[in-house]
Image (spheres, rainbow, N blue to C red):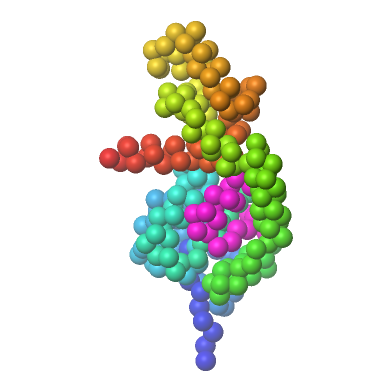
Amino acid sequence: MSEEIINVMIVDDISSLCTRYEGILSQAEDIRVVAVANNGYEAILKSAVTQPDVILMDIEMESKYAGITATQQILAQFPDMKVVILTVYDEDAMIYAAFQAGACDYIQKTATPAMMLQCVRDAYHERSVMKPTVARKIRTEFKRIKDNEDSLIYTLYLVQLLTDTERDILYAFHSGMTQKEICQARYIEPSTMKTHMRNILHKMKCRKMEDVLKKAESCGFFYYMDKIREKQQQG
């Protein structure tokens, strides 16, 4: 009886990396690369056409969370597909978002060929287990929740206290706009802007806007703001 073939799609916006991954996977007799995509949109289309068993998905492509958004949409249509996230940095926020989107595992781009092949096989055969590093991150998050003020839940609660205007201003800072640019874009006086900033700092229990931005990023606030804006543009 012939060995079962695992069909794989590679998704990364750097062509040279796609070529590298394809070269690694082609070494295995039981793995076949059926598609390569260079952005989240292509990944969604090609997953429907080629029906891969496993998808190696980069996160940051045409947008910071493009791979996570693509993962959500693909798994909504094809829940039996297995998505393994490709990541450069072992960032907690990214890993949480990836697992929340439905990814079954993640692997760093610097992983050895043997590790990558094993990861694909484990995902396909549903043998992906929680890595010690992931377990440690989750235990750390439970501690943060217990500590309350540093928890994601508490941060989400604080974000909800902001007004729509304050959230928009926070998002503008995240997008790289300066105070002056935000004033001009929203047609408000600098004094009004300072009032909004004081309110944001007070509600988020921070001394600097940089700390507010870090808190908001940690709970996925900007990720969901991006999704809302994408839907508004599409509608």
- Asked if residue 15 is positioned above or below residue 233 in the image, the reply reads below
| The quadrant where residue 76 appears | bottom left
Identified at 64% across, 45% down, the residue is 145
Q: Which one is nearer the viewer's eye here, 41 or 207?
A: 207
Pick out the residue farthest to the bottom: 1
Residue 24: horizontal and vertical position, in percent? Answer: 61, 65
Which residue corresponds to the image point at 46% horizontal and 18% vertical from the top-left?
Answer: 182
* Whole-percent x, y for residue 78 in the image: 40, 65
Residue 68 horizontal/vertical position (percent) = 49, 50
Picture coordinates of residue 109, whole percent (x, y): 63, 54
Rendered residue at 48%/33% (across/down) = 160
Q: Which residues are magenta?
A: 90-111
Quadrant location of the C terminus in the rendered image: top left
Q: Is residue 105 magenta?
A: yes
Camera sees residue 97: yes
Which of the pair 62/211 is nearer the observer? 211
Residue at horizontal 61 percent and vertical 33 percent from the top: 214
